[in-house]
Image: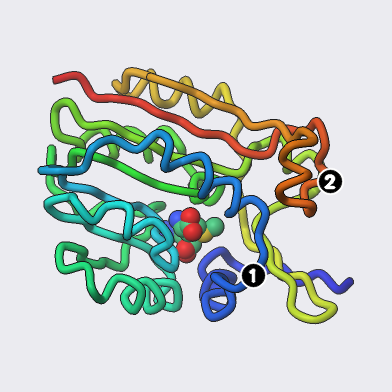
Amino acid sequence: MKIVHLSTQEGYNRWAEAYDAFENPLVALDQYLLPQSMPEFSGKRVLDLGCGTGRYLSHFQKADSVLACDFSSGMLEKARIKASSLAQVEFAEVDVNRPFPFQDQTFDFLFSSLVLEHVVDINHFFRSCFRFAAPGASLLMSTMHPAMFLRQTQAHFQDGDTEFRFESFPHQVSEFVMALITTGWQVKNVSETVINSEWVDSIPKWSKWMDWPVHLTLQAQKST
Ligand SMILES: C[S@@+](CC[C@H](N)C(=O)[O-])C[C@H]1O[C@@H](n2cnc3c(N)ncnc32)[C@H](O)[C@@H]1O
């Protein structure tokens, strides 16, 4: 297999067309786990950081407003099509590694799935999230577990005999937790998913990751 390294943005732009059709076990796992931790959305202003092709936007249907952000124009284009019937969803091209263009205390629910592994400065990221979170806001975010990087895995897709790998920045679980705490968030839950035989039965591609942690979910709240 030929390996080609791409910048994160170029990687996702190139993957955008095929992303939803690609059989991705981490995406399947994430999609099973995260909805279980979602709050009631009625009256809420939702921010989805790194919305990709808009995989979760239909979950936010009852929210007052949804701002879906990504820095990949290819992914955003797909998300726009998927959410065309959701009137309350707006889109913005935002790079989460640059200063955020959001006003203070604007969002009630801060969501991000499988993006944190591309955040360079996790302290700056959570501090910014805290600033534009409204009092009482909740945060639900997931990432590829940092232990996956120990086996030379990172965000990637395959096309023929080429594997395209995108720039990623592994942060340890303790770094995520301490970054949340030191930037003002009250940590509500930290959950690590380890592959067991049940996961392998439902998603056979997980067999080579048996007994290995692959997914991390973080939940936090801003005090009222
Ligand atoms: C694995 S995909 C996840 C997409 C979507 N959240 C999901 O769960 O299907 C990672 C997404 O993060 C976006 N992303 C990565 N780095 C980013 C950055 N610095 N700023 C904004 N978006 C970024 C990518 O463009 C891509 O859409």
Q: Tell me how the rendering is colored.
A: rainbow
Q: Which residue is mark 1?
A: 22
Look at the image and tell me in which quarter the N terminus lies: bottom right
State whether label 2 is within 8 Å of ligand 1.
Answer: no
Instruction: Decide: is 17 above or below 117.
Output: below
Callout 1 amino acid? Phe
197 sits left or right of 139 in the view: right
State whether label 1 is within 8 Å of ligand 1.
Answer: no
Q: Nearer the viewer, residue 130 or 39?
A: 39
Residue 221 placement: quadrant: top left
Q: Residues within 10 Å of mark 2 (few under 14, many from 20)?
A: some
Q: Which element carries disc 2, helix, strand or loop?
A: helix
Residue 132 placed where, x, y %? 19, 40
Q: Which residue is mark 2?
A: 207
Q: Nearer the viewer, residue 165 or 113?
A: 113
Q: Earlier in the sequence, mark 1 or mark 2?
A: 1
Identify which residue is drawn at 39% across, 59% down.
51
Q: Which element carries disc 1, helix, strand or loop?
A: loop
Q: Residues within 10 Å of mark 1 (few under 14, many from 20)?
A: few
197 sits left or right of 78 in the view: right
184 sits left or right of 97 in the view: left
Identify which residue is drawn at 26% across, 66% down.
92
Residue 113 placed where, x, y %? 46, 48
Identify which residue is drawn at 31% across, 68% down.
93
Q: Nearer the viewer, residue 98 or 133?
A: 133
Q: Nearer the viewer, residue 72 or 26?
A: 26
Identify which residue is drawn at 41% across, 52% down.
97
Residue 56 placement: quadrant: bottom left
